[in-house]
Image (spheres, rainbow, N blue to C red):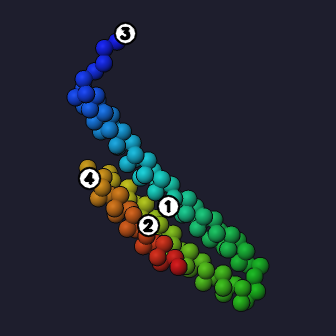
Amino acid sequence: MTPMLPAADISSIAHAIELAVAPVFLLTGIAGLLSVLINRLGRVVDRFRTLHGRQPDLQDDARLSATSEMAVLETRVRQLNAQVIDFIGSLSKNVDYKRGSCCGLVGFFRFNAAKT
């Protein structure tokens, strides 16, 4: 039969595991947010390409509507590119991951507020 570890050793082992696992959750959250931003960027670019390809076949009113929607999509592409670059840049330049993820979240919520 193996001897039981003292409660102090179990507590220190649990703390070491906790410290080892915490960065994994942080990186998973960062990867999830980047995934959302990049997927949204891809969808906006696909919509822009679709409108741009259909534009020669459209009538005057529909062409004007497509042109105005393309202008909005162009603004969204710029905002999303800036958010991804800021998010990655803030993570790579700073050791403080909390600041980087907060910058990315602010940009993410700013985009969603501007979208409505």
Calculate the distance from the C-alpha at mark 2 to the C-alpha at mark 4: 19 Å
Q: Are marks 1 and 2 in contact (CB under 8 Å)?
A: yes
Please report the residue visible at 26 percent of the width from the left and 50 percent of the height from the top. 95
Calculate the distance from the C-alpha at mark 3 to the C-alpha at mark 1: 54 Å
Figure check: 8 above or below 27: above
Please report the residue visible at 40 percent of the width from the left and 68 percent of the height from the top. 107
Label annotation for residue 108: 2
- Residue annotated with mark 4: 96
In-image side of 99 versus 74 (left or right): left
Of the residues shown, which amino acid type is indicated by label 2?
Answer: Phe
Give the quarter of the image for residue 16.
Answer: top left
Report helix, strand or loop for mark 4.
loop
Give the quarter of the image for residue 109.
Answer: bottom left
**Residue 10 visible, this orientation:** yes
Rendering coords of residue 4 (x, y %): 30, 18
Residue furthest bottom in the image: 61
Report helix, strand or loop for mark 1.
helix
Q: Few, some or many C-alpha atoms within 10 Å of disc 1 (few <14, some 14-19, many ≥20)?
A: some
- Residue annotated with mark 1: 37
Q: Nearer the viewer, residue 83 or 112?
A: 112
- Residue annotated with mark 3: 1
Give the quarter of the image for residue 53.
Answer: bottom right
Q: Nearer the viewer, residue 109 or 3?
A: 3
